[in-house]
């Protein structure tokens, strides 16, 4: 019986290590995980979380509205506008130019975020 438990634990360990090696996650900055040029931002409690990001050119950023109210991701200077995002909606944008993009929610202008795009 002890051998069966040992073999089972060994197989589970090997499987866990294999699966961990299959993901391609890299840390972009504290609290943010980037998976294949995709970065997620939550809209929660009338905030963009995180509200400041630094990403490389070509990165796709996806916003998810976790609030029970309508929000937008809008940057007049960068020509970005998600349109109305209801609760549970997702919207993404791929940043193709370097620079700093300041954005806000059209309905809640106090909600602000900044994305710095580097080479």
Image: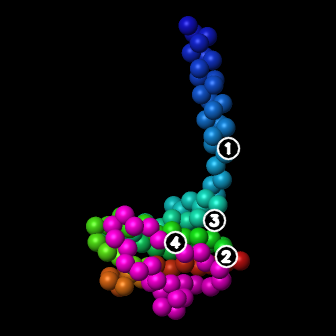
Q: Is residue 112 visible?
A: no
Q: Which numbered disc, 3 or 4, marks the residue that appears first in the sequence? A: 3
Label drawn at residue 92: 4
Residue located beneath label 1 in the image: 21
Q: Which numbered disc, 2 or 4, marks the residue that appears first in the sequence? A: 2
Quarter of the view holding residue 89: bottom left
Real-space CA distance between mark 3 and mark 2, rounded to the nearest whole angstrom: 9 Å
Q: Which numbered disc, 4 or 1, marks the residue that appears first in the sequence? A: 1
**CB atoms of marks 1 and 2 within 8 Å:** no
Q: What span is in magenta? A: 74-101
Q: Is residue 27 above or below residue 49?
A: above
Label drawn at residue 53: none
Residue located beneath label 2 in the image: 57
Which residue: 51% across, 68% down? 62
Mark 2, secondary structure of its residue: loop
Q: On the rendered image, what quadrant is the C terminus found in?
A: bottom right
Residue located beneath label 3 in the image: 37
Q: For the residues carrying marks 3 and 4, which lies nearer the camera in this image?
A: 4
Real-space CA distance between mark 3 and mark 4, rounded to the nearest whole angstrom: 12 Å
Mark 4, secondary structure of its residue: strand
Real-space CA distance between mark 2 and mark 4, rounded to the nearest whole angstrom: 14 Å
Could you say which is closer to the camera, residue 8 or residue 2? Answer: 8
Question: Measured from the top left, where is residue 100 in percent x and y?
Answer: 58, 84
Residue projecting furthest to the bottom: 77
Display colour scheme: rainbow
Q: On the rendered image, what quadrant is the N terminus found in?
A: top right
Question: Measured from the top left, where is residue 40 in percent x and y?
Answer: 51, 65
Q: Residues within 10 Å of mark 3 (few under 14, many from 20)?
A: some
């Amino acid at each position: 019986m002890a051998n069966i438990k040992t073999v089972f634990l060994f197989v589970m360990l090997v499987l866990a290590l294999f699966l961990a090696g299959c993901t391609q996650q890299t840390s972009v900055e504290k609290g943010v995980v980037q998976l294949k040029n995709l970065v997620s931002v939550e809209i929660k409690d009338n905030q963009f979380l995180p509200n400041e990001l630094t990403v490389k050119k070509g990165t796709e950023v996806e916003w998810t509205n976790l609030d029970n109210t309508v929000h937008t991701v809008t940057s007049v200077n960068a020509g970005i506008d998600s349109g109305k995002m209801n609760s549970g909606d997702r919207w993404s944008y791929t940043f193709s130019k370097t620079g700093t993009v300041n954005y806000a929610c059209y309905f809640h202008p106090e909600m602000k975020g900044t994305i710095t795009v580097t080479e």
